[in-house]
Each structure stands twice: as structure tokens, then as C-alpha cells.
Amino acid sequence: MTSSPNYVFAAKLSEVQAAGCTAVHVNGHTVALFAHNDQIYAVDNRCPHMGFPLDKGTVKDGILTCYWHYARFDLASGGTFDQFADDVRAFPVEIRDDEVWIDVAPPDDLKGHHRERLRVGLERDLPLVIGKAALVLLEHDDDSVTPFRVGLEFGTRYRQAGWGQGLTILVCMMNILPYLNQEDKPRALYKGLSAVARESFGSAPRFPIRPLTSNTTDIPTFKRWFRQFIEVRDDEGAERCLVSAIRAGADDRQLADILFSAVTDHRYIQIGHVADFTNKAFEALDIAGWDLAETVLPSLVTAYANASRQEESNAWRNPIDLIEILDDAFGRLPQVVAQGRELRGQWPGHDDLIPILLSDNPRDSVEALLAALAAGAAETELAATVSYAAALRIARFHTSNEFTDWDTALHTFTFANAIEQGLRRAPSIELLRGVFDAAMSVYLDRFLNIPATPLPQPNGNTADTAALLAELPALLNRQQQVNQAADYVARYLFHDGQPDPLLAMLGKLLLREDRDFHTIQTVEGAFKQYSRRRGADAGNHTLIAASRYLAAHAPTVRAQEQTFSIAQRLHRGERLFEG
């Protein structure tokens, strides 16, 4: 009679003692039984690292060593001594006469265990551990927020320099998750989380600055102080202002106003990265929860204080002084915005503005933007128009340019997108300056379109959209299929191909490549822009731009995909050691 309903018969005691080790099948489990130092031990026979049978291993002094990669485990508890592996499941054992019985009750809190394993993978930059954890956690109630939140907290706490590319990639991956097929969602999480681990590895932690002890200061004063401290590159003073504003109850819109105002106090700081990082930090909090604001937002401040400023750049000063043009425009902004407020909803749109933004006269661009505001263009409408102009620079990028010039176009696009999203969150005259900065960067990028690659046009021929989509992966297995990829995407869209399968395919093709920060930014930004232009020519052009950038940066070695495929096969229970 069993002492617990979860205990089941496993083997004859005498047979286990005679063999020293044997593998048995019990209630769907393959269990390795070991006779060691007059005790019987039972562990899952599948090594938690890569699935090798542990009954092929050796036991010495109570330590079980796997024969394949030499992962070591405490035979009694199953705990691993090698963090690249995992704890192997150990089953409680009872001896009843000449019989070995084991407790096969399911383990407690499987989700909690893999959440902890994810933390270990982040701490030690173990991509396989991260991949396995992402697969289990996403499978559990289709919960992507839990692993995302773990990665967000880790990245903001354990990288001294604060917010960087890794966290930005993580947020990009969460943003494209809804567009992906189910099978690719854990792959996206893995890519984002492993990017955080890689960037944080070896870094000192970030020690936060405490808020002011008095909370009597109002939010406008904190905003003014924050901008003053950033102006003189004092990150400690600025961080204390920001964390004090958070503690004083500033809401998401007020915090966006504080930060985005400082982002645009100088021109196109750090070639747009700081604006993009700021936008991604706010999007991260929208996903993970605003209870993390005091951890997440201060991680941005060091980048603000240390950022390059284009007032110091020759390209923005000569042969045309763009800073002088912008300063004059900024002085006119309040009056122009007030004038146009009475005409909101009457602006005819971007069709006439786009050619001016893509021209070679920066004064004309600035005057056209001011005229649009006076004619009733909302801040977000103006920002969206500049974002589209920036996307067209990529869509029309000629491959006679140097390869690194792709990044120049990308920086303008992601900056314009960040400013647009910021204005949708917290519109202000200060942030509106960023739209003009983005327009000047579009102007400076004009050389990328000399000559301009023509945008694909409908030709009246029919096309099999399913076949076009199916052929894209093979096309991007070859280098520099830039124009060909654009042609495939254009023909798919022109022939009424459904957008959702195309977005899923572009996401899949992005994820199979090794991480490239700028390519990820491009595709994620294009998806965001397309979501507001779905079915329109401007939306199609944005996806054409994304496909061209992706094709230019493919194929890679795909080492990260190899690691994830191992995690995926292990998750399915495959026997990797058999080939």
C-alpha cells in the first residue's frame, strides 16, 4: 500500500543495486536510477542542458556528470553546478522491501522556475538558457509580458551606462510580436532578451539616485531644473530631478513632456538615438506597467547628458547654417501653431509637402512646415509626413552608395518616428522642434537618393501573391537582393496580397538573421508606420523601404538561430544526440 498516491513502482531494488544504474519508464517519464553509497537515487534521465541520457554518465562522490558536455549535478537534489545547464528533476524515492518506488507528482511552480532560469541566463549571458526559458514562459498562458518585464528590469538595473541598444531591441521585439506567426513569437522574445544579456554582460550595475526628501516641488519646476542640468551635462542632478518628479506623482504625459523637451533642446542629439531610446522606454512601460517608471526612465539620463549635439557639427553649419534657419523658425512656432489651431482638420495633407521635404533647399522645407502648421496641420500630422519622407529616403536608396550609408538613412527614419510617437503621447511646442530637426536630417540625406532608385509601380500584370511570399525566404538567402526584394513586396501589395501574411513573413525573415540593431529598428519602425497607413501607397512604400533594408543586410551567419533551434528541439523533446 503506497504512502502517497503519487508514488509508483519503478524497479526491483536488487536489480538496481546489481546494475549500479538503470533507466526505467514510469508514467511517461524516463528515469535514471542510481545505486550509490547504499542509497537509491532517481533523476530525470534527460540532461536538462541538451537532452543526453544521464544513465550514460558517471557518479563520483555524490556528483553525477553528464557524458556529453560534462554538466555536473548533485545526485540527491538534482541541483546543477554548471549554470549553462539547469537543475535536473530529482524524484523522491521510497524503498519497500525489494521494490523502488518514486514520487512522480508534478513539480511546483514551473513558471517560477523558468522565470528564475531566465534571470540566470541574463546574468551570465547564456543564450540557450534564455531561449529555453522564453519557450516555456510564452507557452504558459501565452504570457509574453512576464519574460519581457524580467528582461526590462534586468537591463535597467545591471548596465552602468543605462539604456542602450539591448533594451531597445527588446522593446522592438515586443512591438512586432502581434504581427508574427505563433511559432515566431518565442524567437522574437529570445532575440530581445539575449540582446539585453549581451549588452549587460561584464558591466557594473547601475546604482540609482534617490529622490529629494521633500515632495513639495511642482512638476513644471522639475522640468525646468531637469533641462538646466542636461544643458550643462550634469547627469546626476538631472537624474535626481527626474526620479523626484516620478515620486511626486508625475503621470506618463508629464514625464514624456519633461524628457522629450530635453531631447529637443539641442539639434538631433546623438544622431537620433536618444529620442528613439526615450520613445522605446515609454513603450516599454506601457507594456510592462508604470510601476517600473522609477527604475526604467532614470536609465536614460546619462545618454542625454553625454549626447553629441549637431550645433557642433560641420554638416549642420556649412555650407548652409541649418541651426540659424531652425532658430528663426522656432521663434515663430508659437504664433504659427496658434494661428493654425482654428483651422485644424482642414489641412489638405502631405502630398504637396513631401516633394519639398525631399528637395535640396532647407529653407523651403522649413517654410513649408511652418505654412502647413498655419494652415491647420496638427503636430502629429506634420510629424507623420516627415516620417514618411524619411522612409522614402530608404525606399529610394541607391545601391551605388556605400554600404554604411544605409545607417545614415536609418537614423533619420527612427528619429522621425520617435518624435512622431512622442507627439502622439505628449504634444508640445518644445517637442515640435524635433519635427524640424528630422526634416533637416532628411534634407542632409539627399545624397542617398542621387540617383534615386525608382519606386516600384504597378505594371498591369497579374501575380500569384502566395508564390511571391513563398519565394521571399530563398531570395534573401542571397546577398544584396535589395531591388529584387522591393519588387517582390511591391507586386504582392499591388495585387491585393493580404498585409498580415506579408508582415509575418518580413518578421520571420528578420528573426532568422543574427541581431543587427539598425535592421531591427528599421523593420519595427516600418511596421509602426504601416499600422497608420495600412492599404495606402504611403504604407506600401514604408514596407518596401523595410524590405530593401532587410535584404541589404541578409544573409548573416545565423548563429543565433542555430542556438534557438536547439532550444526549440529540446522543448519538443527531440533527441539531439542522435542527429
Image (cartoon, rainbow, N blue to C red):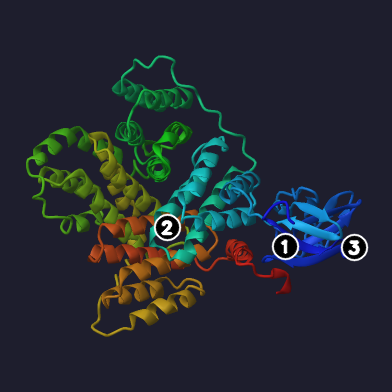
The amino acid at mark 1 is Arg
Tag 3's secondary structure?
helix
Mark 1 or mark 2, which has the lower sequence index?
1
Q: Residues within 10 Å of mark 2 (few under 14, many from 20)?
A: many
Q: Quadrant of the C terminus?
A: bottom right
Q: Identify the disc placed on residue 14.
A: 3
Tag 2's secondary structure?
helix
Q: Nearer the viewer, residue 471 or 361?
A: 471
Q: Is residue 81 left or right of residue 554?
A: right
Image vertical order of residue 182 relative to residue 196, above or below: below
Counting from the top left corner in percent of width and height, residue 369 is at 19, 46
Residue of label 1: 46
Residue 447: quarter of image: bottom left
Residue 66: quarter of image: bottom right
Residue beneath the point at 28% across and 66% down: 540
Residue 431: quarter of image: top left
Mark 1 or mark 3, which has the lower sequence index?
3
Residue of label 2: 177
Indicate which label's residue lies in the foreground, 3 or 2. Answer: 3
Indicate which label's residue lies in the foreground, 1 or 2. Answer: 1
